[in-house]
Image: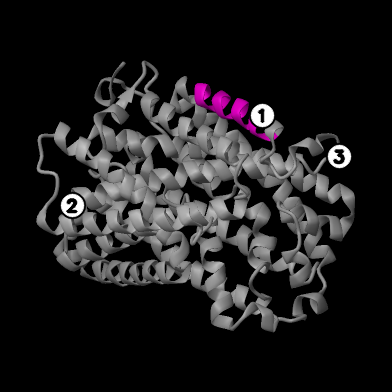
Amino acid sequence: MSDGTQVAAPKLKLGALTALVVSALIAAGIFSLPQNMAASAGAGAIIIGWVITFFGMLTLAFVFQTLANRKPEIEGGVYGYARAGFGPYMGFNSAWGYWISAWIGNVSYFVVIFSALGSFSALGFFGEGNTLPAIVCSSVLLWMLHFMICRGIQSAAFINILTTVAKLVPLALFLVLVIVAFKVDTFRLDFWGTAALGSIMDQVKSTMLVTTWVFIGIEGASVFSSRAENMRDVGKATMIGFALSIVMFVAVTLLSMGILTQPELAALKNPSTAGVLKAAVGDWGATLMNIGLVISVGGALLAWTLLAAEVPYLAGKDGTMPKFFGVVNKNGAPVNALWLTNGLVQLFLIITLFNSAGYLTLLLLATSMILIPYLLCALYALIIAIRKDGYSEAESGLRLKDLLVSLVASVYGMWLLYAAGPKYLFLSMILYALGVVFYLKARKEQNQKPFMPAEVVIAVVVVLLGIYAAYELATGALTL
């Protein structure tokens, strides 16, 4: 074992960085989008939701591109920017929230991949992905990925490129076939939703966590900035991944609404693209999409296992999290972060045997954990633009553009917190409160004061909210 500074690992090129972003974005979420979006919104509200998401996520992608170019010395992406802008405790919370979001998201991926396999009659024993056979097979796959990554990040990144290409093929076929079968009358039916779905604003808000979930991973290249061959490739990979993904997400969602009505889509089992294509071309369409999901999520699991371990590794290396996380093996893989991350995934997989929480519940909780880190990144970009930090006098026009973009991204981040509603943000406080123990350990290892004066107030509020949320959960007043 050695620390991260003693291992010279191969650097990642633009193709590998782009594949990490695309693989993280185009995963299980896109295969479940038709049902997830139609569950609480009509076509009109969904279009509005995607417009808001497009501009919001575009500005957020520009934020990561700007920060990569203006602050190339900051490692760790999401948490590194939060720490630079708001101090060590908020930096820790950003790393902690991102890490938890990543591995909870991985649990949801295992659930949905075996749910897809369970749709085949011969594999019906996998059920909804949370039966005993499904958990056993999920566990085997989990530890296969674990030991693959332990052999080195570079080899895992190469395999990720292959799976990224492979997952795009069934999705391209889906779009072609659905375009052919698209019916305008079906799309127009109850365009603004039924009375049971609530107001347009309620419907739009209901789409926000889902659209945000599918875009988690937009920061994937920035997380691996310390392993990039060229820092400018980080920004390029982010924008390429965003452009490809937004086209795919919107097309899959809206075209599906020309195949089945909103109530029919809402009633589909996930992955709902299988049900859509079955309605369009027959049973073989469902088979195609279920196979596509298995390939897609397999690749996404690899990408997200890499991402989930990289953040605590970098945070452990620089003292933001306990130094235990910053250990690598002889291949340069963050071995301790991997063991703890995948151990927690394993624990939650077992918990799904005894809890009815499925894919959608897990993704909503995972998304709520990452909203605060995203907002902090946008606010940091706004701060450096206001302070002219990293800008020359000749770049006043560019600074004003970045100022406007980061302001919109910050407003979007605040909108997401509002749209998410209190339930999952409240539940996330339990997990943020647990993080205080790890933060105090890291500060002790660095011989630093636990908190700055303003941070004490924030920590106390987080802990009290976490305790209260845990009480509400234990008494049944709050449920998953």
**From the image, which quarter does the N terminus lie in?**
top left
Q: Which residue in the structure is indicated by mark 1?
A: 137
Looking at the rendered structure, the kind of residue marked 3 is Ser
**From the image, which quarter does the C terminus lie in?**
bottom right
**Magenta segment:** 134-148
- Near-viewer residue (72 or 306): 306
User: How many C-alpha atoms fall within 10 Å of the one at disc 1: few (<14), some, or many (≥20)?
Assistant: some
As displayed, is residue 96 above or below residue 175?
Answer: above
Q: Nearer the viewer, mark 3 or mark 2?
A: 3
User: How many C-alpha atoms fall within 10 Å of the one at disc 2: few (<14), some, or many (≥20)?
Assistant: some
Looking at the rendered structure, the kind of residue marked 1 is Cys
Looking at the rendered structure, the kind of residue marked 2 is Gly
Inter-mark Cα distance, 3 to 2: 54 Å
Q: Would residue 122 be visible to someone looking at this image?
A: yes
Identify the mark at residue 87; answer none if there is no mark.
Answer: 2
Horizontally, residue 90 falls left or right of residue 145, namely left
Q: Position of residue 273 (x, y in %)?
A: 74, 55
Q: Earlier in the sequence, mark 3 or mark 2?
A: 2
As displayed, is residue 311 above or below residue 382?
Answer: above
Residue at horizontal 68%, vertical 84%? 195
